[in-house]
Amino acid sequence: MASIQRPVAISARLLRLDNPIHCLTVAFWLWKALLVVVIAACPGRGYDTSTSLISDEPGAPTGMIGSLSVPLKFARWDSIYFLHTAETGYVFEQEWAFGYGYTKILELFISETGVERSGGVGGPVNIALAGVALSHVAHYLSVLAVYGLTANVFGCTTISQKLICFLSAALHIICPAGAFLSAPAPESIFSFLNITGYYLYSCSLIAGYNGKTLSRDSLLLTSAALFAVATTVRSNGILSGFLFAYDAAVLVWRTFTRGPSLHNTIRLGIIVLGGCIVAVGMVFPQFVAWRMYCASATDPRPWCEWTVPSIYTWVQDHYWNVGFLRYWTVSNVPLFLLAAPLIALLCRSSLWAMSASEHAHAPDHPGSMLVRLGIPQGLLAVMALTSYHVQIINRISSGYPLWYWYLASGAVDSLSSPKANHRVLTTAVQAMVGYALIQGVLYGSFLPPA
């Protein structure tokens, strides 16, 4: 339901609903401290020694744990590429598979905080430390964004509504992205940008519902800018552009059924502009790469001759073998099994969103966010199942709040319904905590899956 008014027989004081931000803050930093200890305690350089490629230089700092400093314990898998790119820029073509936006944000963070990027092993260690700090800050802010967004969509006046807000934000803390939300990786930045974009978009709906046209349009375009930056961080951010496609379709239908009006025409122009801003997040990195490898190159790369040149598509296809059904091999069956629970949860919650919202036919109401977010999340699950390295759904799903709402609202409903399944949320929390701790050990030891 988009708004739950039934009182729930549970103590607000017990769950600190009188001071939820304080409670979430304490829970967040305790959880992060536990993950850091788990990862830092992993012995040695790990099964894969790729981290040594960025750390085996003279002048290694003291305070090493198992021959690697604590920050470099987080330099695993994709993080190695991000750290290298942040330090040197894009050197190898295959590095363009890794978000242009994240490396630029990390570079900006490093320059603003005065981190030294050169000088023996100190450079990589400092960059890794900056990346870890940036991820922690971004993840914490995205937790607050989940709380604010949930309050906008469900309300935050009754005990039931406050509990949904609290539980949704708490689920984001322990979500299956786990170590990747603490490492120098784009997941936490993407979650912050995408969820904050949703928050501002919901604020625009509230402003429009209250007749504040200027505020509505300003908030809408600001959310589009955040979605654009999120798309430079992770390409699946482009799915958030569906919000603008949805609004445009609604206005076109209104114009078709009720006739044109100046107000609707201006509104449609703002929405189209917002959609174009989101698209810039996909186009701009491609343009930068095109200038580097095509416009100014003496020997242009093959993808330069395409009708729509795209280094991202080329790199994913040529270097990483990403494509439709290419991951469907017998050797990858365990990874499909690992991803299956969350894919099922994403699909189920998307279907729930289509039917649960009492404001599905009132697109100007903030409660209609359920319908708006159902389709993008469903598309993400289908794309992960058919075209991605499927196991990454466990981390990229962190930037999509709908499945948090599904679990939280189901738990609240179960408290007032004797026939409801009371164990769904408990089982989900136990699974996520267990998975995150096991993943932390595997991550710190540089072992799959990633």
Image (cartoon, rainbow, N blue to C red):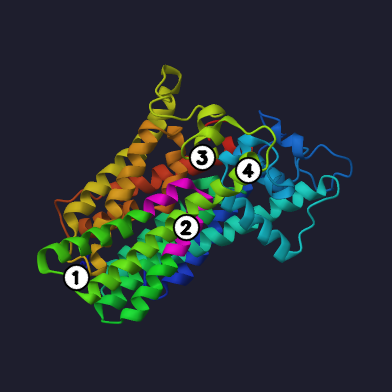
The alpha-carbon separation of the residues under discs 3 and 4 comes to 13 Å
The residue beneath circle 3 is: 310
Distance (Cα) linking label 4 and label 2: 24 Å
Distance, label 2 to label 1, CA atoms, is 36 Å
- Residue at coordinates 52% horizontally, 58% vertically from top-left? 139
In which image quadrant can residue 293 be found? top right
Precedes in sequence: disc 3 or disc 1: 1
Residue 434 seen = no
Disc 4 target residue: 295
Q: Earlier in the sequence, mark 2 or mark 3?
A: 2
Badge nearest the viewer, 3 or 4: 4
In terms of image quadrants, where is residue 172?
A: bottom left
Q: Nearer the viewer, mark 4 or mark 1?
A: 4
- As measured in the structure, the alpha-carbon distance from the residue carrying label 2 to the one carrying label 3 is 17 Å
Q: Nearer the viewer, mark 4 or mark 2?
A: 4
Q: Earlier in the sequence, mark 2 or mark 1?
A: 1
Residue tagged 2: 228
By secondary structure, the bulk of the magenta-drawn segment is best described as helix
Which of marks 4 and 3 precedes in the sequence?
4
Residue 146 vertical position relative to residue 353 in the rendered view, above or below: below
Q: Residue reaching furthest right?
A: 58
**Element type where label 4 sits in the image:** helix
Q: Position of residue 426 (x, y in %)?
A: 33, 49
* Front: mark 2 or 3: 3
Name the residue type under label 3: Ser
Q: Which mark is residue 5?
A: 1
Residue 194: horizontal and vertical position, in percent? Answer: 44, 58
Q: Are marks 4 and 1 in contact (CB under 8 Å)?
A: no
Q: Magenta segment range?
A: 224-240
Crowding near the residue tagged with mark 1, few <14, some 14–19, many ≥20 C-alpha atoms within 10 Å = some
